[in-house]
Image (spheres, rainbow, N blue to C red):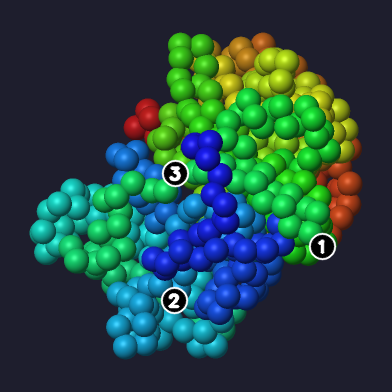
Amino acid sequence: MTDIAVTVPAVTVNGQSRPLDRVATHATALDWLRETGLSGSKEGCAEGECGACAMLLATPDAAGGTTWTPVNACLVPVYALDGQEIVTAEGLGTVDDLHPVQEKLAEAGGSQCGYCTPGFACSMAGEYYRADRNGVDRAVPRADAAEACPVHDDAEHGPNGFDLHALSGNLCRCTGYRPIRDAAYTLGFPEADDPLQQRLAEPAPVAIATDAVVDGARFLRPASLAEALQVLREEPTALVVAGSTDWGVEVNIRGSRAPFVVAIDQLEELRALTETDEYVEIGAALPLSEVERRLDGRIPLLAQLFPQFASRLIRNRGTFGGNLGTGSPIGDTPPALLALGARLVLASADGEREVDLAEYFTGYRQSVRAKDELITAVRIPLPLAKTTAFHKIAKRRFDDISSVAIGFALDIDGGVVTAARIGLGGVAATPIRAYATEQALIGRPWDLTTVKAASAVLRGEGTPMSDHRASSDYRSHMLGTALLKFYSQTVIASKEVSA
């Protein structure tokens, strides 16, 4: 990140620079786009659940080029895009020259009222330009690449490699998903002269320091972690945001207006992922989609978590630091991280300290983190437990808030449980460890008798409450069945290995 702030913040939109002149510091990208005449992006839910507002953000790839990353414009503070580059539905194509994604949607009848279509088009375009979608080098001529594209044998990928999860954050209430899926599955690959494809060969914009003050409110993007920590020392009441998938909802639904916002999403010090012999360290501001890509399944418990965490659009912005920093008892990452025995690195202007995640939460949305401290990283100790699982109970399989979330991590040696960690979410004022259940398992044979006895203990863990998502009795019942389900999965897996 450079340490030179531009005089007037600006965003490159569809290839043209647009100034952020006197825009309110709480304004979202969606509101700003629509006010400037780009009304293709729509507000459906204002919570990041419908995807009608999706746009493409130019983000760096591992090779020094660019990736078109779909994100929810309704959640991103527009000043967080200072110096950045986005493409909206208007930038994909025109009425007279449709983009291939728009063309296929039209051919398949993938739009009725059209309200959600611009968002679908942007999310679909992100997948259209995904570098490894066809499984071959993009330098291969287009016709050969199409022939080399692997054929997937599951219901969530098309014959062209299109991953339907790319659309998991986009909802449509009138068209139906079959024609939209058909459009996605008939997409080819970008032509060599496609401007958006050519753009990917160039570096993504670097993050720049930003300091905007409008009508007494301030939005600050520090140039470094040290600067951010010093600011928090001087202004401990400042609101810290990373992906803004939580605060964006507060702005839209509850009218939140923070007088001072400090954005840390682009701080390089918080975006690393390193592995040592002792632990895996994940930067607190590294987007979850990027964590998933870099880990590539090396932590199986997290590999199970990621597809169930909200939607791809949310994971493209959401972070571990934000999910833990809000202190929500129904966040999806804490149960998994508790099961993994994770520790948090907290930093202030005075230095760093490390805290066991099991000791981090102190009450409802409260923690041991001081107001002038930031979560800088999550450390997952090695070696990992050999038998793990993540269970999420929600009304929808994907893109939903959990009623109960459970992370399991067991070591089983010679048929006996030698170690156990179980993390729970949604059953108390904070995420918790199921210590009593762990003790009911350790030292006992991993069999149905042990599991039934431990399940009775697990059912009584926490103090589940009743709300609009589930009753306390239902939550307790789900706890009681979760361990049985986990056990049955391990038995099935064992039989498959033996076969």
Q: In the rendered image, which residue does mark 1 sit on?
A: 255
Q: Nearer the viewer, mark 3 or mark 2?
A: 3
Distance in Å between CA atoms under marks 3 and 2: 24 Å
Q: In the rendered image, which residue does mark 2 sit on?
A: 90
The crowd level at tag 3 (other Cα within 10 Å; few <14, some 14-19, many 20+) is some
Label number found at residue 206: 3
Query: Is 377 situated left or right of 496 in this image?
Result: right
In the picture, which quadrant includes the C terminus? top left
Task: Identify the residue at image location x=49%, y=29%.
Answer: 272
Is 483 in front, or is 33?
33
Q: Nearer the viewer, mark 1 or mark 3?
A: 3
Task: Identify the residue at image location x=56%, y=79%.
Answer: 37
Kindly identify the amino acid type of the residue bearing the numbered disc 2: Glu
Q: Earlier in the sequence, mark 1 or mark 3?
A: 3
Is 101 in front, or is 269?
269
Secondary structure state at the residue bearing disc 2: helix
Secondary structure state at the residue bearing disc 3: loop
Above or below, 154 against 327 in this view is below
Whether residue 268 appears in this view of the structure is: yes
Label number found at residue 447: none
Distance in Å between CA atoms under marks 1 and 2: 29 Å
Secondary structure state at the residue bearing disc 1: loop
Kindly identify the amino acid type of the residue bearing the numbered disc 3: Val
Residue 375 location, x and y as percent? 67, 29
Kindly identify the amino acid type of the residue bearing the numbered disc 1: Gly
Task: Identify the residue at image location x=73%, y=32%.
Answer: 231
Distance in Å between CA atoms under marks 1 and 3: 31 Å
Whether residue 445 appears in this view of the structure is: no
Pointer 1 and pointer 3: residues touching (CB < 8 Å)? no
